[in-house]
Amino acid sequence: MRKLMFILSALVVASMLLTACGGGQPAATQPPAATQPPAATEAPATEAATEAATAVPSPTIPPPVLTGGEGCDPGATQVTWFVGLGAGTDPNVIPDEKAWVDNYNKSQKEACVLLNIVANTGQNSYDALRALIAGGNAPDIVGPVGKAGRASFQGAWADITPLAQQAGFDLSTYDPALLDFTKDEGVLVGIPFALFPSFIYYNKKLFDEAQLPYPPHKVGEQYDGKDWNLETFQNLAMKLTVDKNGNDATSPDFNPQNVTQFGYYEQSTDARGIAVFFGGGLPYDPADPTKAVIPPNWVDAWKWYYDGMWKYHFIPTGDYANSDQFGKGAVWGSGNLAMAHTHTWYTCCFDTAKMSWDIAVMPSVNGKITAKLHGDTFAILKESKHQDVAFKVLSAMVTDPALNVIYGGIPAVVADRPAYFAALDAKTAPNKIDWSVAVEMLKYPDLPNHESWTPNLAVVNPLFGKLRTDMEQTPDLNWDDTIAKLKSDLEAAYKAAP
């Protein structure tokens, strides 16, 4: 399949959702930061300063990859492209990025694109980009980058809308919901590019063994004569949770101490990713960002998920999830899980051809469907000295199918999707995956998004990672105390925000 998937696979192992895909970053339960790239340099005159700012060679962190504008027209304006806040730094991808730049530079005379690729190990690329900005050598374009990566540089991104108007770029061809998703704090900072919706992965073999029908592939379809809602979903997950004696979790004889197969799991996300199953939200007051506000629907979602582990036993606890039998955190890939909620990028992280599987739409919760969304774009820094030329490069990037193939997300441009899904079909054969489910789930993003900016993100992210860990490891969690402590810790982080 696409080479980005190997990047994402590495990111999953590193567990990073808490910031990226967004990606960020706690352990086996966090999603990959599938939304961030490296750093770009300014003109050749500044390359020495750029190398000093970005090169952090060590036994584990490779030096930055820089290009010098070979093949450019002598009169072209130099535009730097920084890659490193997520996807794009894997050695297998770099030659393709270089080839794209080379082809683009030779195809026109207005822009000369310079690449600066900085390994996204730990905070390496983030620190490099901060150093470039602080030193007056800010790159022009950063990407691919998602909400979590952009949130780490909140307020640093240019508004794309006037640049698009000036260039005659028609934004009305994009789904308004996707344009809203690509806004940060109400400002359109990029053009929808690579999209990673979430949905329900299901193991057909386990459904067949239980003689249960597969879950719905279309919004509005019923499941076995019942609405596809939270109650129906939970009951199904319990029937698909089995102990060593073959009793399912609806049976009075079920033994939760010896489970061999679970019905459901939130794969690769933190507590916010779990929360938005019940709808989007922000953990602070937008009118006063020093004040923590825990959305009630988030609390409801956490309690439901917690009860799923400790009361109804259809979700693996931390001990189960991290065991050998359940893939040491990669629960879906173990083959002993009936249903998982995660994103398109997770096709990177299990044997898609060996397992018999398909995908289903999200169930409704309180009458509403929410499918948390990750998405990459390319953004222009406010510090760019050439925003108009940078936008022309950016508009070519987001509409070129070649880059979408490199990074592997569902193209925002509908006409490019058949080729994308054809490549996925080849990877997942002999399975016949109903990719219309993924496209349908794009209509139900979590807004506000779970990777949205918060004050002091570097401190806040671990708090939500810890909450998921506490949920998975504590059988008698006091929720009143837990929420009060989380709110207190969040407010302390907000007030200490740099």
Image (spheres, rainbow, N blue to C red):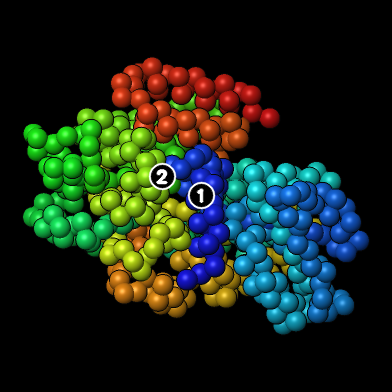
Which numbered marker is on residue 328? 2
**Which residue is pictured at 51% across the width and 49% down the height?**
13
Q: CA distance from mark 2 to mark 1?
A: 10 Å
Q: Nearer the viewer, residue 109 or 127?
A: 127
Residue 99, image x, y percentages: 68, 76
Residue 114's place in the image compared with 177, above or below, is below
In this view, the residue farthest toward the right is 45
Report the number of discs: 2
Residue at far top of view? 481
Residue displayed at 37% across by 29% down: 473
Picture coordinates of residue 335, whole percent (x, y): 30, 55
Say which of marks 2 and 1 sits in front. Answer: 2
Please name whichever residue, 105 or 338, is drawn nearer the observer in this view of the structure: 338
Q: Is residue 166 visible?
A: no
Q: Which residue is mark 1?
A: 13
Q: Is residue 309 above or below residue 388?
A: above
Q: Is residue 286 above or below residue 403?
A: above
Provide the secondary structure element on which disc 1 rests: helix
Residue type for callout 1? Val
* Left or right for 444, reference 192: left
- Nearer the observer, 347 or 199: 347
Q: Which residue is depicted at the point 77% across and 56% down?
A: 63
User: Is residue 319 toward the left or the right of residue 243 in the image?
Assistant: right
Amino acid of disc 2: Lys
Q: Regarding mark 2 in the picture, which secondary structure is present there? A: helix
The image quarter containing residue 243 is top left
Q: Earlier in the sequence, mark 2 or mark 1?
A: 1
- Regarding residue 390, the answer to whether it shows in the image is yes
Specify few, some or many for label 2: CA neighbours under 10 Å numbering under 14, 14-19, or 20 or more. Answer: some
Within-10-Å neighbours for mark 1: few <14, some 14–19, many 20+? some
Q: Which is more toward the observer, 361 or 79?
A: 361
Q: Position of residue 71 (x, y in %)?
A: 81, 79
